[in-house]
Image: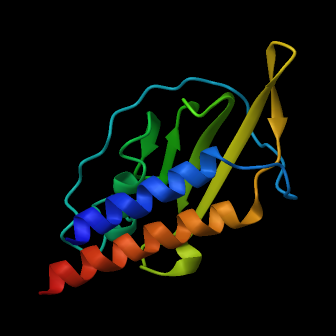
Amino acid sequence: MQAAALNITRTIIIGSILGLSACSSLPFVGKEEKQTGTLNTASYDTKTTALGVNGYLWRAALDTVSELPVASTDSTGGVISTDWFTSDTAPNERLMMNIYIMDDQLRADALRVMVHRQIMTDGSWTPADVKASTNQQLEDTILLRARELRIRAID
């Protein structure tokens, strides 16, 4: 039941990301660059992975982006990056995400999400604004999932 609710929430958030309109002060950061990497499947049943990143936040972030093309992960630095992705409903818009886990504690200030958006203009991808609330909604989703994982581990 909780997994179904999480999937619905994830679908709604990803859908809302893809339906963004330009109205934010967050400019595009970064550039198109395909990186390759493998998912680190370290043990998540402890507070932190062997490398010092909060295991619950790490797992929750991977769960949240599991439907997206993951370009690279770095559990040492606590970074997860997706590749650019588009939706069938918005083929002239693409997005990518960078998720940063900056502490070994399960705290809201230990997590940052940056969504980058581009739109097709005259045959080339152009940086576009992202709603400020989008990053916060994704952070909230990851934090909620991390808390669920922690509660499940305690029981």
What residue sits 45% from the left and 25% below the top? Answer: 36
Q: State the residue in front, 106 or 128.
A: 128
Q: Is residue 30 above or below residue 142?
A: above
Q: Relative to the observer, which residue lies in front, 147 or 17?
A: 17
Q: Is residue 83 visible?
A: yes
Residue 58 in view (yes/no): no
Against 134, residue 91 (above or below) is: above
Q: How is the image coloured?
A: rainbow
Q: Residue, x 46% and y 36% (percent of image)?
A: 72
Residue 49, quarter of picture: bottom left
Between 65 and 92, the one lying in front of the other is: 92
Q: Is residue 52 left or right of residue 91?
A: left
For the image, the number of numbered tags is 0
At horizontal 23% and vertical 53% (from top left) the residue drawn is 42
Q: Which residue of the protein is positioned furthest toward the front in this rendering? A: 89
The image quarter in which residue 85 lies: top right
Residue 38 lies in what quarter of the image?
top left
**Image quarter hosting the C terminus:** bottom left
Point out residue 52 in the picture as x, y percentages from the top left corner: 38, 65
Q: Is residue 80 above or below residue 148?
A: above
Q: Residue furthest bottom?
A: 155
Q: Quadrant of the N terminus?
A: bottom left
Rendering coords of residue 13 (x, y %): 52, 58
Q: Residue furthest left?
A: 155
Q: Residue, x 37% and y 60% (percent of image)?
A: 8
Residue 28 lies left or right of residue 40; in this view the side is right
